[in-house]
Image (spheres, grey):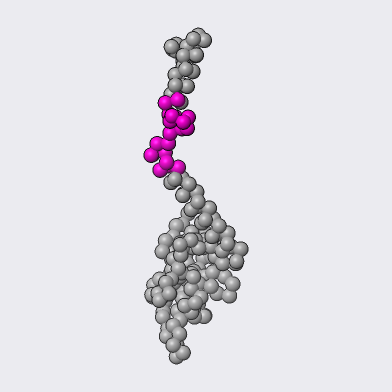
Amino acid sequence: MQGENKIYTSREEVEHLLQQTQEGDKSARDAKGKKKWSFGKIIRRSFYGLLILSLLLMLGKVWLDRANGRAPSLFGYQVYVVETGSMIPTLPVGSTILIRSLGTDEYPQVGDVITYTHIAAAVTHRVTEIIAGDDGVVRFQTKGDNPENSPDPWLVEREEIRGIMIWHFAW
């Protein structure tokens, strides 16, 4: 049917190919003229539909968090970018960190890197000491890893903690 250059040379050959294509389309249809859906095609379409729906819901959750002035969180995880050198050499400026929100009865331990809210900023420092106050409230002393840093002049309360760093990536 085809020459070496893959071009059809006669009208009969083209019509024969067209007829084969149309017969193939007819065999893929049932008796009522509707296309048959294979089991694999149904599974694939369902999977892609659920994937798209999931992505849209996640995007909506992030948008809703941003609209309400909260840090976007998906499944209890948040992503931040380190903007200062207070955690050098552990976290260079520009590092991306993944934070896991704390459970209701969970507290950070000494050595954990936490992200907390101080005034209106997110701060990521290491817990150096756990202090139980006379009022029964547990507070945390933090400090950046940079050797030039001194301990933070404030104590962090549990309610101020956004989460514990579980992963970081430096470019």
Who is closer to the viewer here, 24 or 7? 24
Residue 100 % position (x, y)? 44, 66
* Residue 73 at least partly seen: yes
Residue shown at 47%/77% (left/top)? 158
137 magenta-colored: no
Q: Is residue 139 above or below residue 83?
A: below
Q: Residue 64: image x %, image y %?
A: 58, 62
Residue most toward the front? Answer: 32
Toward the viewer: 124 or 40? 40
Front one among 110 and 41: 41
At x 48% / y 61%, what residue is drawn? 74
x then y, percent, for residue 129: 41, 79
Residue sitting nearer the eye, 143 or 121: 121
* 69, above or below 60, in the image: below
Q: How many labels, in total?
A: 0
| Residue 141 visible in the displayed image | no
* Residue at 52% across, 80% down: 154
Quadrant the N terminus occupies: top left
Q: Which residues are magenta?
A: 26-45
Residue 7, given in percent of the width and then of the height, sits at 49, 14
Residue that appears at 45% across and 42% down: 45
